[in-house]
Amino acid sequence: MKRVLIVFGTRPEAIKMAPLVKEFKKYEDIFDTKVCVTAQHREMLDQVLDFFEITPDYDLNLMKPGQNLFTLTADVISSMKPVLDDFIPDYVLVHGDTTTSSAAALASFYFGAKVCHIEAGLRTNNRLSPFPEEMNRQITGRLADIHFAPTEQSKLNLLKENVDPDFIFVTGNTVIDALLYAKDKVEEINDEQIEFLKSIVDPTKDLILVTGHRRENFGEGFINICNAIKQIALEQDVQIFYPVHLNPNVQKPVNNVLKDIENVKLISPLNYPAFVWLMKKSKLIITDSGGVQEEAPSLGKPVLVMRNTTERPEALNAGTVILVGTDTAEIIHHTKKLLMNKDLYNQMSTAHNPYGNGETSREVFEILLKLSSN
Ligand code: UD1
Ligand code: UDP
């Protein structure tokens, strides 16, 4: 039986790999599947593991407060060796563009396992934006044997880089599988965080949901973002919810600028079901997150993206997101426009989600099964 190792380390990877873990684990008679978490994130990863009821077979427990890319990369590579030696996988599945993905892909390549890249082929072709994710994704793409591209556009990006078309598969994005799993559940489950949110959400006011964490926005970018949120809160009759990423480079400016504003609720990162519940309750979302851009259209929520470049042009073309950068005035302008212009709002909130139909994990499983039997 072929052995499959699924590796991830951060919150978004965990959310997007969880449906794959569930799919592969359903067929223990077909693949011997094990899960390795690097724990590049700790609390934010554990929240996801809890919700999807995943117990990792290997936990490298690498996160250090305020970690840097140099030691994290080195730690992932060196800590992967004993795992690879122990399990001897035929295939290693990595996801997207994090340091965990590129370093685990490199370790797996050294080991001689076939690297399968989930969410392959997204590109800005700007080495510095998103940083370091664009290069992480390109490196992982070069190392990968099999590429699972979410859209035709991402397949095209890989073809331009001369990747063998026989090993590129357009499968949609597993983020939709995860969202469909969670979407209805959040109305039924008894979750402490959802109950807490229910107790503080004011249903008479428009709710704006904010998240942010990108390295290229650290410093001035984050101060601009926070100033925009502050002004929106002071001028508009809205409630703003902001689950603040645990990165100290985010915590500091956000708390400095937004701490004492009555209609801005600064809260800890939410578990996935609570975040999905809050997305459903929101009028619009302001974020620099990749995953949130992909999820929100399925819930009919317009997204203002606080970035200047995007590796997700499908969402732009579908009209579900607008790139607003990190300029204070631009963020305020677009937010007000969406709050006031009903036509624009309706157009954005009813656009089609280009990222899949919830069958991606199944497709990945079947493709790997076929390839492994050849
Ligand atoms: C990482 C990824 C980024 C991804 C993001 C998702 C890289 C280079 N960056 O960025 O691509 O979009 O995750 O959120 O791979 N922290 C905690 N607890 C946690 C998680 C983080 O305390 O559960 C704090 C720690 O101080 C940690 C810091 O955040 O050192 C930074 O974490 P890190 O994974 O290096 O960077 P992110 O900005 O989270
Ligand atoms: N998310 C969450 N709790 C939060 C904020 C976000 O569970 O408080 C989820 C969100 O639904 C999405 C993912 O985390 O699936 C996005 O993670 P993040 O923005 O950290 O990373 P990115 O997608 O930008 O890599």
Image (cartoon, rainbow, N blue to C red):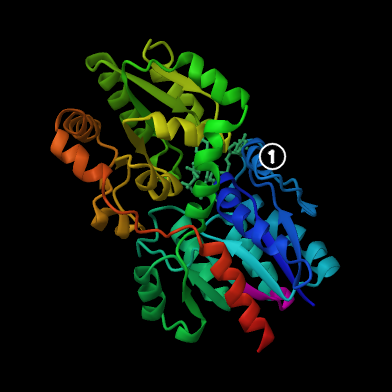
Task: Specify whether residue 223 is painted magenta.
Answer: no
- What residue sits right under mark 1 in the picture? 50
Three-letter code for the amino acid on which mark 1 is drawn: Asp
- To which quarter of the image does residue 373 belong? bottom right
Query: Is the distance from the Cβ of mark 1 to the nearest ligand 2 atom less than 8 Å?
Result: no
Asked whether residue 270 is in view, the answer is: no
Q: Residue furthest right?
A: 86
Magenta residues (range) = 110-115
Q: Position of residue 56 (x, y in %)?
A: 76, 51
Q: Return the residue nearer the eye: 305 or 366.
A: 366
93 relative position to 314: left or right: right
Q: What residue is drawn where x is 37% and y is 22%?
A: 240
- Vertical position of residue 198 compared to residue 225: above or below: above
Mark 1 is surrounded, within 10 Å at the Cα level, by few (under 14), some (14 to 19) or many (20 or more) other residues, namely few
Q: Quadrant of the C terminus?
A: bottom right
Q: What residue is drawn where x is 62% and y is 52%?
A: 18
**Count of numbered tags:** 1
- Vertical position of residue 319 compared to residue 142: above or below: above
Q: Return the residue nearer the eye: 92 or 328.
A: 92
